[in-house]
Amino acid sequence: MDPAPTTLAEFGIEPAFAMPRRDDWRIGMVGFGSIARHAHAPAYRAMGWPMVAVADPDSGARRAARDLGVSAVYDDYRALIADPRVEVVDLLAQANVREEVVEAAADAGKPLITEKPLARTVAECERMIGRAARAGIALAVHQNYRWMPANYAARALVRAGWVGEPYLVSIQIFGSQDVHLAGHAFYASCDDFLTVQWDNHLADLLRCWTGRNARRVLARTGRMAGQSFASDNLICVLADFGPGLTGHVLHHELLRSSLASQPCRIDGDGGSLVFDLWGTTITLDSVRLEGGPRRIDLAPLGLPPSFAGSMGDFLAAVEEGREPEVSGRRNLATIRTIIAEHASARAGGVWVEVAAG
C-alpha cells in the first residue's frame, strides 16, 4: 500500500527560508558561465533582485550578459568591484581566481558570496576568511543543495526528532556527466571532479542533515574503460561521524543509459526518511506515527529556487549583521572533509583523519 499523503505543516514544520527585507540589493556577478546564466541569474530574477553588473574575460559570456539586459558589463572583475552601483559581489569564477577577488572585495568593503568549493586548500580558505574578517565584510558559500525542497525538509524533520537519533545518512547518485560534460574545459580535465568539485555538495549535506562533522573518511574511486573524464568518475565514501553515526556516498557519472537516479535515506533509532536528492516529495516512517508511513508533498510549498535560498540567507545576514548559515568559517568543515576524501582516494582507499577545526 502506498504511504498516506500529507503535508510538512502536519509535522509542525513551516518552511522559513531566511530572506532579506530589501528587494533591491544590487548584485555584481564575477564570472558568467553556464551555472551563472542558467541557475544563478534565473533564481535572482525570480526574486526580483537586480543584477547590475557582470565581469567576465570571455566575450561570449559578456554578450550573454548584455542579452539578458545587464547594464554594466566588464572584462575585468576589478572594474566591477569598483562600480558604485554594485553592493554585493557574487563570485562565480573557478577556484583558481577566488582569493584575488576576495582581496579586492575586502579592499572595497563589499560583502561577497562565492560558488563552491570555497577553495582547493585549507590554507587558501583561511586566508580569505581572515581577510574578510579584517575588512568586516560577510563571506559566504553557495552550498545551495541545502535549500532544495527534499534536503531542506529532511533537515527540518531530523531536527524535530521524527527519526530519533540518526545512525546512517546515505546519498547515491547515478548520473551521466561523463557524457554530457565530456567537452567541458575544466571538469573533464581536472583530477578531483568527484572528490572535491562534486562531493563538496554531498559532504556538506551530510553535515547539514545531522549537525555533525565527519571525524575520518574512507574514499575509493574507480573508472570505466573508455570514460571521457581524466579523473576517476566513480566514488564510494564512508564517513565516520563518531559513535553512532555513519555517512555513506555512492556516486558515479558514467551512465550510458537513461536509468539515472538519486536516492537518499536517513535512518535513526526512531524512524526513517527516504527521498530523491532533487525531489519534491519525502517519505517518513516514525515510531511517533500511527497508521504507517507518510508521503509528504513539498511542491505546493512553492519554495524559492535553491540559489535564491543561499543568496537570500546571505543578503539577510548582511542586513542583520549576523553570520551567514554557510559562512566561509562554517564551510571550512566541509572543505576539510573533501580534502581528506581526496587524499584517501589517492592513497587507494584508506581511512584519513579529517583535520580538526
Image (cartoon, grey):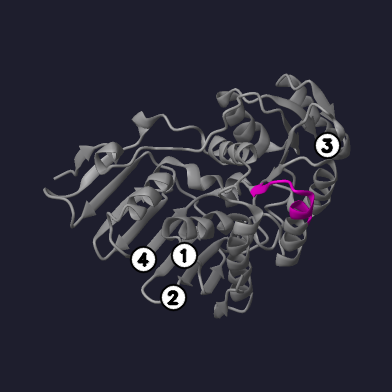
Q: Magenta span covers which residues? A: 131-140
Q: Which residue is mark 1?
A: 212
Kindly identify the residue that appears in the image at 65 percent across and 48 percent down. 140
**Cα gap from disc 4 to disc 3, whole angstroms:** 44 Å
Quadrant of the drawing holding the C terminus: bottom right
Q: Which residue is mark 2?
A: 242
In the rendered structure, which disc, 1 or 3, sits on the residue that comes first in sequence?
3
Q: Tell me: residue 73, above or below residue 166.
A: above
The residue lying toward the viewer, choosing from 354 and 179, is 354
Q: Which residue is mark 4?
A: 168
Residue contact between numbered discs 1 and 2, judged by CB atoms under 8 Å: yes
Q: Is residue 123 left or right of residue 13?
A: right
Label 4 element class: strand
Q: Amino acid at mark 4?
A: Leu
Q: Residues within 10 Å of mark 2 (few under 14, many from 20)?
A: few
Residue 127 x, y percent position in the rendering = 77, 61
Label 2 element class: loop
Quadrant of the drawing holding the N terminus: top left
Q: Amino acid at mark 1?
A: Arg
Instruction: Find the residue positioned furthest to the front.
Output: 321
Residue 95 x, y percent position in the rendering = 74, 53
In the rendered structure, which disc, 3 or 2, sits on the residue that comes first in sequence?
3
**Cα gap from disc 1 to disc 4, whole angstroms:** 12 Å
Q: Amino acid at mark 3?
A: Ile
